[in-house]
Amino acid sequence: MTGSLSLHAQILAIGLTLGLLVIIFEMVRRRRIQERYALLWVVVLLVLLLFTVVPTTLPAAAHLVGISNTTAALLALLSVMELVLLVHLTSKSSVADERLTLVQQEIALLRLEQELREKAQVGLVHTPASDTREDDAGQHNS
């Protein structure tokens, strides 16, 4: 059969795939990776395991999409999966970057408010809040 794996390569591929599955599950257990990303990796690894354990599935899948070389089909599949993963991670990174910018702005505003409160307490800055306190104090003295 064209493009089939030798027994040695098959055993190595199965071992690597199972090892990666164990690593993914351990990362989930230690909360080093979120479940949604782990699920993505598990699906990818199970597809690769299927192609390794049942060597006729890759040539059949290649034939379905019109690719005659199984190596080229595997490379195309991995490339598409990589592109999908990159687009997904770029999207997540962009959202995280926007959230980080908002948090930084909120922290800057909170620091400014705190600084103004501290200066108002020592009488260096006249704030609307200190006007209210002075008005209240003036009303009690009358």
Image (tube, rainbow, N blue to C red):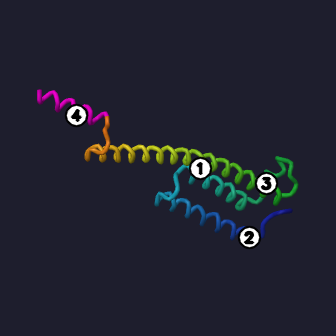
| Residue denoted by label 4 | 133
Secondary structure of the residue carrying tag 4 is: helix
Total numbered badges shown on the rendered structure: 4
N-terminal-most mark, 2 or 3? 2
- Which quadrant of the figure has residue 45? bottom right
- Front position among marks 4 and 2: 4
Query: Mark 2: few, some, or many residues within 10 Å (few <14, many ≥20)?
Result: few
Asked if residue 95 is positioned above or below residue 133 in the image, the reply reads: below
Magenta stretch in the rendered image? 128-142
| Along the line of sight, the residue nearer the viewer: 47 or 57 | 47
Distance from disc 4 to disc 2, alpha carbons, whole Å, reads 81 Å
The answer to whether residue 52 is left or right of residue 24 is right
Amino acid type shown at disc 2? Ala
Question: Closer to the observer: label 2 or label 1?
Answer: 1
Kindly identify which residue carries mark 1: 93
Mark toward the start of the polypeptide (1 vs 4) = 1
* Mark 1: amino acid: Ser
The secondary structure making up most of the magenta span is helix
Q: Residue 9 carries which label?
A: 2
Work out how far the residue at label 1 is from the one at label 4, CA to CA, in angstroms: 47 Å
Q: Which of the two discs, 2 and 1, labels the residue nearer the N terminus?
A: 2
Report the residue marked by disc 3: 76
For mark 3, does the 10 Å Cα neighbourhood hold few (<14), some (14 to 19), or many (20 or more) residues?
some
Horizontally, is 71 left or right of 103 in the view? right
Q: Is mark 3 on a helix, strand or loop?
A: helix
| In the displayed structure image, the side of residue 76 where residue 136 appears, left or right | left
Answer yes or no: do the residues labelled 1 and 3 have beta carbons within 8 Å?
Answer: no
